[in-house]
Amino acid sequence: MKPKIDGFVLAIITVVFLAYFFPYLGSKNSPVPLNLIGSMGVSLIFFFYGLKLSPAKLKTGLKNWQLHLLVQASSFVLFPIILLAVYPFIKTESNQTIWLGFMFLAALPSTVSSSVVMVAMAKGNIPAAIFNASISGLIGIVVTPLWMGLFLQKTATDFNLGTIYIKLITEILLPVIIGMALQRYLGDFVRKYSLQLTLFDKSVILLIIYKSFAQSFDEKVFSAVNLVDLALILLAVLGLFTVVFFAIKQSAVFLNFTIEDRITAQFCGTKKSLVHGTVFSKILFHNTASVGVILLPLMLFHFVQIFIISILASKLAKQH
């Protein structure tokens, strides 16, 4: 089975081109209130996310604690440590912005839908994948701002961790809690219209990506990033993915994981959520013009992880 080109990846590329040719609607002077629309869309995304989370299943999923610990440690500790190791070598201001984008990528939680789909395709531990992908998003609400706060406080005078958490609680955590509370009443609705809700999620993410890149293009932020820089960023993304992927593999072998658990650990532990990334960037970086550059490593990582993991999932599916 040949891996298919992800339609969402093509949509992201299209949106970036639209932002380049038509940046005005996403600029600070835009007559369209994209920030307000995006905020409302984000809250709805996480409300529906809460409707999908089953407290009973999350409680049951706690049993395989070694697997969960490896996945979450990879997502929130291993990734950032790798980025911290190269921080002393970052000298120029433009490189610091790109590094900040990588650090933002490293601090993000795992993605939910694609992790579960790929684990299922590769015949890994699906319940563990669902648990880890779900719990990772909740952990990220707390941990991601903490990691970024170490560096944003040095570069942004208006960065306030308390304000950030208030926004995260009101726009993300509260909708999730409300969704979980209403799950018994609206759970069937979510399952019935899951495809339509997925389309809604992706539409909101595309809107935020357009806004971020349009503002960056409008203020000529990308003038500091040439084709050589772009190629180097892509190589760095590939290197980061490869190091984490094989580090998780060796850890899983050391812990005597079954093949199903190893697949889940590698597939979930190496993933980073574009949904959380675009949403968090809107809150963490406000309307800074460089947000498009900061999102660039995440978007390239998203392409890389889908491409590589889909190929590996197809091969593993044929083996057993």
Image (tube, grey):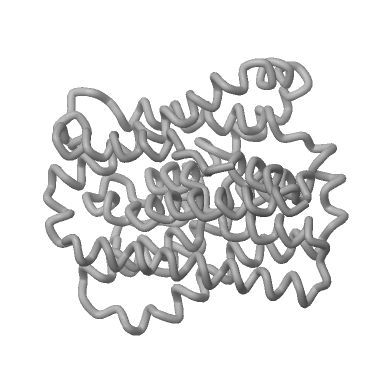
Q: Is residue 141 visible?
A: no
In the rendered image of this protein, does residue 222 appear above or below residue 32?
A: below
In the rendered image of this protein, does residue 124 appear above or below residue 149?
A: above
- Left/right of residue 139 with respect to residue 241 in the rendered view: right
**Residue sitting at 44 percent across and 73 percent down?**
83
Count of numbered tags: 0
- Left/right of residue 313 with respect to residue 206 in the rendered view: right
- Left/right of residue 143 with respect to residue 6 in the rendered view: right
**Residue sitting at 40 percent across and 40 percent down?**
9
Examine the image and state in which quarter residue 22 appears.
top left
Q: Position of residue 166 (x, y in %)?
A: 50, 44
**Residue sitting at 78 percent across and 50 percent down?**
125
Q: Is residue 30 visible?
A: yes
- Left/right of residue 252 with respect to residue 6 in the rendered view: right
- 138 or 7: nearer the viewer: 7
Q: Position of residue 28 (x, y in %)?
A: 18, 37
In the rendered image of this protein, does residue 177 appear above or below residue 128?
A: above
Name of the residue lying farthest toward the bottom? 88
**Residue sitting at 13 percent across and 42 percent down?**
218
Q: Position of residue 48 (x, y in %)?
A: 60, 27
Examine the image and state in which quarter residue 47 appears.
top right
Query: Which quadrant is home to the N terminus?
Result: top right
- 172 or 107: nearer the viewer: 107
